[in-house]
Image: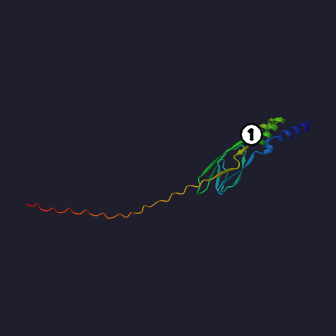
Amino acid sequence: MKLAIVAAVGLAVAGCATVTRGTTNQVTVSSEPTGAEAVSSSGLFCTATPCTWEVSRKTEFAVTFKKPGYRTEQVQVGTKLAGSGAAGFAGNVLIGGVVGMGVDAATGATLEHFPNPVFVTLQPVAAPKPVRVARPRKVAPVKAPAPPAASAPPQS
Protein backbone atom coordinates (compact mmCIF):
# COMPACT_ATOMS: atom_id res chain seq x y z
CA MET A 1 0.00 0.00 0.00
CA LYS A 2 2.80 2.45 0.88
CA LEU A 3 4.47 1.73 -2.47
CA ALA A 4 1.25 2.63 -4.32
CA ILE A 5 0.99 5.93 -2.43
CA VAL A 6 4.62 6.79 -3.15
CA ALA A 7 4.12 5.95 -6.85
CA ALA A 8 0.96 8.08 -7.05
CA VAL A 9 2.70 11.05 -5.42
CA GLY A 10 5.69 10.59 -7.69
CA LEU A 11 3.49 10.65 -10.79
CA ALA A 12 1.61 13.70 -9.55
CA VAL A 13 4.83 15.60 -8.96
CA ALA A 14 6.33 14.49 -12.29
CA GLY A 15 3.52 16.20 -14.18
CA CYS A 16 3.93 19.38 -12.19
CA ALA A 17 5.22 22.37 -14.18
CA THR A 18 7.04 23.60 -11.08
CA VAL A 19 9.23 20.50 -11.22
CA THR A 20 9.58 20.23 -15.01
CA ARG A 21 10.04 23.96 -15.81
CA GLY A 22 11.14 25.56 -12.55
CA THR A 23 9.98 28.81 -11.01
CA THR A 24 12.48 31.10 -12.77
CA ASN A 25 13.13 31.99 -16.37
CA GLN A 26 16.18 33.43 -18.14
CA VAL A 27 15.44 36.73 -19.86
CA THR A 28 18.00 38.09 -22.33
CA VAL A 29 18.26 41.88 -22.62
CA SER A 30 20.00 43.44 -25.62
CA SER A 31 20.15 46.65 -27.61
CA GLU A 32 21.39 48.09 -30.85
CA PRO A 33 23.93 49.56 -30.43
CA THR A 34 25.25 47.24 -27.74
CA GLY A 35 26.77 48.55 -24.52
CA ALA A 36 23.69 50.26 -23.11
CA GLU A 37 22.93 50.23 -19.40
CA ALA A 38 19.77 48.22 -18.67
CA VAL A 39 17.81 48.52 -15.41
CA SER A 40 14.62 46.63 -14.55
CA SER A 41 11.80 47.89 -12.37
CA SER A 42 12.32 44.75 -10.28
CA GLY A 43 15.87 45.79 -9.34
CA LEU A 44 17.96 43.85 -11.87
CA PHE A 45 20.59 45.70 -13.91
CA CYS A 46 23.52 45.29 -16.23
CA THR A 47 26.09 47.91 -17.14
CA ALA A 48 26.46 46.90 -20.79
CA THR A 49 24.03 45.01 -23.00
CA PRO A 50 23.65 42.20 -23.93
CA CYS A 51 23.07 40.41 -20.64
CA THR A 52 20.85 37.67 -19.20
CA TRP A 53 18.83 37.80 -16.00
CA GLU A 54 17.29 35.00 -13.92
CA VAL A 55 13.73 36.18 -13.18
CA SER A 56 10.80 34.66 -11.28
CA ARG A 57 8.35 33.37 -13.87
CA LYS A 58 5.47 35.33 -12.35
CA THR A 59 7.29 38.69 -12.22
CA GLU A 60 6.27 41.34 -14.76
CA PHE A 61 8.60 44.33 -15.07
CA ALA A 62 9.86 47.17 -17.25
CA VAL A 63 13.40 47.49 -18.63
CA THR A 64 14.90 50.96 -19.10
CA PHE A 65 17.82 51.30 -21.53
CA LYS A 66 20.27 54.24 -21.31
CA LYS A 67 23.33 55.08 -23.39
CA PRO A 68 25.05 58.45 -23.78
CA GLY A 69 24.10 60.10 -27.06
CA TYR A 70 20.86 58.08 -27.36
CA ARG A 71 17.29 58.52 -26.17
CA THR A 72 16.27 56.55 -23.07
CA GLU A 73 13.92 53.71 -24.04
CA GLN A 74 11.66 51.51 -21.93
CA VAL A 75 10.19 48.07 -22.72
CA GLN A 76 7.42 46.38 -20.72
CA VAL A 77 7.93 42.65 -20.07
CA GLY A 78 4.80 40.65 -19.29
CA THR A 79 3.95 37.02 -18.67
CA LYS A 80 1.76 34.57 -20.57
CA LEU A 81 0.81 30.94 -20.30
CA ALA A 82 3.55 28.83 -21.88
CA GLY A 83 2.75 25.84 -24.07
CA SER A 84 4.91 23.49 -22.01
CA GLY A 85 3.65 25.07 -18.79
CA ALA A 86 0.08 24.31 -19.82
CA ALA A 87 1.08 20.70 -20.51
CA GLY A 88 2.56 20.37 -17.01
CA PHE A 89 -0.55 21.94 -15.54
CA ALA A 90 -2.75 19.54 -17.56
CA GLY A 91 -0.62 16.66 -16.30
CA ASN A 92 -1.69 17.64 -12.80
CA VAL A 93 -5.34 17.42 -13.84
CA LEU A 94 -4.93 13.99 -15.46
CA ILE A 95 -3.01 12.49 -12.58
CA GLY A 96 -5.21 14.13 -9.96
CA GLY A 97 -2.53 16.40 -8.53
CA VAL A 98 -4.68 19.15 -7.08
CA VAL A 99 -1.77 20.12 -4.85
CA GLY A 100 0.49 20.33 -7.92
CA MET A 101 -2.02 22.59 -9.66
CA GLY A 102 -2.01 24.92 -6.67
CA VAL A 103 1.79 24.94 -6.52
CA ASP A 104 2.05 25.70 -10.25
CA ALA A 105 -0.42 28.56 -9.96
CA ALA A 106 1.34 30.00 -6.90
CA THR A 107 4.87 29.81 -8.32
CA GLY A 108 3.99 30.94 -11.85
CA ALA A 109 5.69 27.82 -13.26
CA THR A 110 3.18 27.70 -16.13
CA LEU A 111 4.18 31.21 -17.28
CA GLU A 112 6.90 32.59 -19.51
CA HIS A 113 8.09 36.13 -20.15
CA PHE A 114 7.40 38.07 -23.31
CA PRO A 115 9.05 39.57 -25.13
CA ASN A 116 12.05 37.35 -24.54
CA PRO A 117 14.63 38.29 -25.64
CA VAL A 118 13.98 41.93 -24.77
CA PHE A 119 15.46 44.00 -27.61
CA VAL A 120 15.45 47.71 -28.34
CA THR A 121 16.97 49.84 -31.09
CA LEU A 122 18.20 53.04 -29.46
CA GLN A 123 17.58 56.27 -31.33
CA PRO A 124 20.37 58.86 -31.41
CA VAL A 125 19.65 62.18 -29.76
CA ALA A 126 19.41 64.80 -32.46
CA ALA A 127 22.61 66.81 -32.55
CA PRO A 128 21.98 70.44 -31.76
CA LYS A 129 21.84 72.59 -34.85
CA PRO A 130 24.88 74.79 -35.23
CA VAL A 131 24.33 78.33 -34.03
CA ARG A 132 24.67 80.80 -36.84
CA VAL A 133 26.46 83.96 -35.91
CA ALA A 134 25.23 86.94 -37.85
CA ARG A 135 28.04 88.67 -39.65
CA PRO A 136 27.94 92.45 -39.71
CA ARG A 137 26.82 93.70 -43.08
CA LYS A 138 28.67 96.34 -44.94
CA VAL A 139 26.44 99.33 -45.21
CA ALA A 140 27.01 101.89 -47.92
CA PRO A 141 27.57 105.35 -46.47
CA VAL A 142 24.59 107.60 -46.71
CA LYS A 143 25.27 110.83 -48.59
CA ALA A 144 24.01 113.99 -47.00
CA PRO A 145 21.45 115.76 -49.14
CA ALA A 146 22.76 118.77 -51.06
CA PRO A 147 21.81 122.16 -49.60
CA PRO A 148 18.97 123.85 -51.42
CA ALA A 149 20.09 126.11 -54.21
CA ALA A 150 20.09 129.77 -53.32
CA SER A 151 17.32 131.54 -55.03
CA ALA A 152 18.08 134.69 -56.97
CA PRO A 153 16.72 137.97 -55.55
CA PRO A 154 13.66 139.19 -57.36
CA GLN A 155 14.39 141.62 -60.09
CA SER A 156 12.45 144.70 -60.43
**What kind of residue is marked 1?**
Ala
**Whole-percent x and y of residue 48?**
66, 57
Q: Element under label 1?
A: helix
Front residue of this view, candidates 142 and 125: 142
Screen quadrant of the C terminus: bottom left
The residue depicted at 62 percent of the width and 49 percent of the height is 74
Residue 96 sits in quarter: top right
Q: Is residue 17 left or right of residue 36?
A: right
The residue depicted at 84 percent of the width and 42 percent of the height is 14
Q: Is residue 125 left or right of residue 144?
A: right
**Whole-percent x and y of residue 89?**
79, 38
Screen quadrant of the N terminus: top right
Q: Residue under circle 1?
A: 106
Q: How is the image coloured?
A: rainbow
Q: Is residue 145 left or right of residue 103?
A: left
Front residue of this view, candidates 123 and 101: 123
How many marks can you see? 1
